[in-house]
Image (spheres, rainbow, N blue to C red):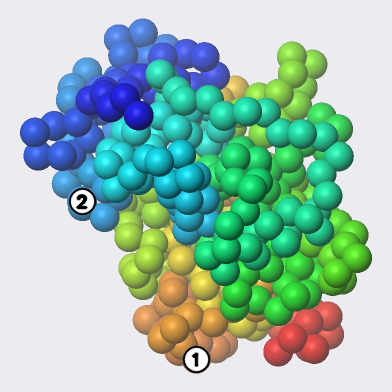
């Protein structure tokens, strides 16, 4: 693959700026003059709308600012890409992070795209989900799959560790997940049940479905909230995870819900609905035993028409453990066994009414016990 030391960043066909590798292997960024005149800050805390060269100080985003690292795939996508490159006699270790962004091109999560891009073939129609799930298991089991190109095209730029594809259903864009090694074969049914319970608990969710299977109870799918369709066609929505906004290493316990509540207040200009929704997610994660609540599992969407940020719909809500047995995001300093005391402390510190916090907490705890008791 031809290697280059720079890439151009676009947002809905408008040039945002340029990424370039420094002598120290950091990836510098500079806004274009046209974007400074009529654009917005793509990462409010790290990249203010100024005419200067920005160089990241953190190392764990492979030399990138978090906003661009959000475009890169995580575990599953990286596994697919590395296998695909090796099948074409290319060494993935020779790729720079700019090479990987070029491969993402126009297909990454959120609205940012990268040029010049390396394109992959378009997906076929009439997907057989059971066959794709079997091919995913082959990849996870280090067996050969003759569908590597198709699997990468369908899911190689998605985030998260679980195998998944991104596909069109009518005019809508969906993500469909398959079980990983650590999951039971009915992990899809469990995540679907969790999504229904979360919605009942007042948590804003994108539409979810359980797609049929002949091998298990079904595959979990969710409509993408970083894509919207209007009279002008499909539009990509700019999205930032909490990890990207705060330049945090999401693979390490690096946050407390105090910080998430504060981030929500600041970024959304103290939007009460978003603040309450973040509180509800904290309660749900505690009572439903979702301990993989790391900083990349919370995101915010930019509303261009109103020049404002809003909390995104919730995602990746399911029963989960961590290898150290604690919530990745602590609750008032407690990651192992947070309860009413810690949850209340977070809500009250964020300016919420104590009685309202208690009502929400009791409502969610009761709903979780009723609907998810078989998993807990």
Q: Residue at x 31, y 39 (%)?
A: 95
Which is nearer the N-term, disc 1 or disc 2? Answer: 2
- Residue labelled with disc 1: 337
Residue 301's quadrant in the figure?
Answer: top right
Query: In the rendering, at what x and y percent does residue 51 appear?
Result: 22, 18
Compared across the picture, whether 63 is left or right of 325 comes to: left
> On residue 358, which mark appears?
none
Judged from this view, the residue extending furthest toward the left is 23
Label 1, residues with CA under 10 Å away: few <14, some 14-19, many ≥20: few
Query: In the rendering, at what x and y percent does residue 161 appear?
Result: 53, 62
Q: Residue at x 74, y 86 (%)?
A: 375
- Residue labelled with disc 2: 58
Asked if one can make out residue 109 in the rendered structure from this viewpoint, the answer is: yes
Q: Nearer the viewer, residue 318 or 162?
A: 162
Above or below residue 326? Residue 264 is above
For label 2, the SS is loop
Label 2, residues with CA under 10 Å away: few <14, some 14-19, many ≥20: some
Q: Residue at x 39, y 54 (%)?
A: 243
Above or below residue 274? Residue 143 is below
For label 1, the SS is loop
Quadrant containing the N terminus in the rendered view:
top left
Query: In the rendering, at what x and y percent does residue 348 appear?
Result: 49, 72
The mark tally for this picture is 2
Compared across the picture, whether 225 is left or right of 255 comes to: right
Q: Nearer the viewer, residue 104 or 311?
A: 104
Q: Residue at x 17, y 46 (%)?
A: 57
Query: In the rendering, at what x and y percent does residue 46 appear?
Result: 28, 40
Q: CA distance from mark 1 to mark 2?
A: 31 Å
Compared across the picture, whether 207 is left or right of 1 comes to: right
Q: Nearer the viewer, residue 69 or 287?
A: 69
Quadrant containing the C terminus in the rendered view:
bottom right
Above or below residue 192? Residue 114 is above
């Amino acid at each position: 693959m031809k290697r280059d030391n720079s890439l151009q960043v676009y947002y809905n066909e408008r040039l945002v700026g340029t990424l370039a590798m420094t002598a120290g292997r950091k990836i510098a960024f500079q806004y274009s003059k046209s974007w400074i005149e009529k654009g917005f800050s793509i990462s409010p805390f790290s990249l203010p709308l100024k005419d200067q060269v920005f160089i990241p100080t953190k190392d764990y985003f492979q030399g990138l600012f978090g906003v661009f690292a959000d475009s890169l795939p995580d575990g599953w996508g990286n596994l697919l890409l590395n296998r695909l490159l090796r099948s074409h006699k290319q060494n993935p270790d020779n790729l720079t992070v700019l090479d990987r962004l070029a491969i993402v091109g126009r297909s990454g999560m959120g609205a940012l795209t990268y040029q010049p891009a390396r394109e992959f073939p378009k997906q076929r129609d009439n997907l057989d989900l059971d066959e794709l799930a079997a091919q995913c298991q082959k990849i996870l089991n280090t067996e050969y799959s003759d569908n590597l190109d198709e699997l990468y095209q369908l899911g190689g730029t998605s985030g998260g560790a679980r195998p998944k594809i991104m596909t069109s259903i009518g005019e809508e864009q969906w993500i469909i997940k398959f079980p990983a090694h650590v999951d039971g074969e009915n992990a899809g049914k469990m995540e679907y049940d969790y999504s229904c319970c979360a919605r009942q608990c007042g948590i804003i969710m994108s539409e979810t479905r359980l797609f049929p299977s002949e091998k298990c109870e079904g595959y979990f799918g969710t409509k993408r909230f970083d894509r919207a369709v209007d009279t002008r066609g499909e539009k990509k929505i700019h999205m930032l995870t909490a990890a990207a906004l705060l330049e945090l290493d999401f693979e390490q316990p690096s946050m407390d819900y105090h910080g998430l509540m504060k981030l929500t207040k600041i970024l959304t200009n103290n939007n009460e609905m978003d603040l309450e929704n973040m509180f509800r997610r904290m309660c749900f994660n505690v009572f439903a035993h979702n301990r993989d609540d790391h900083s990349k599992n919370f995101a915010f969407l930019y509303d261009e028409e109103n020049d404002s940020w809003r909390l995104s719909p919730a995602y990746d809500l399911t029963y989960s453990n961590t290898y150290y047995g604690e919530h990745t995001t602590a609750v008032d300093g407690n990651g192992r066994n947070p309860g009413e005391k810690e949850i209340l402390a977070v809500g009250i510190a964020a300016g919420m009414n104590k009685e309202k916090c208690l009502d929400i907490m009791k409502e969610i705890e009761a709903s979780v016990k009723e609907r998810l008791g078989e998993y807990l």
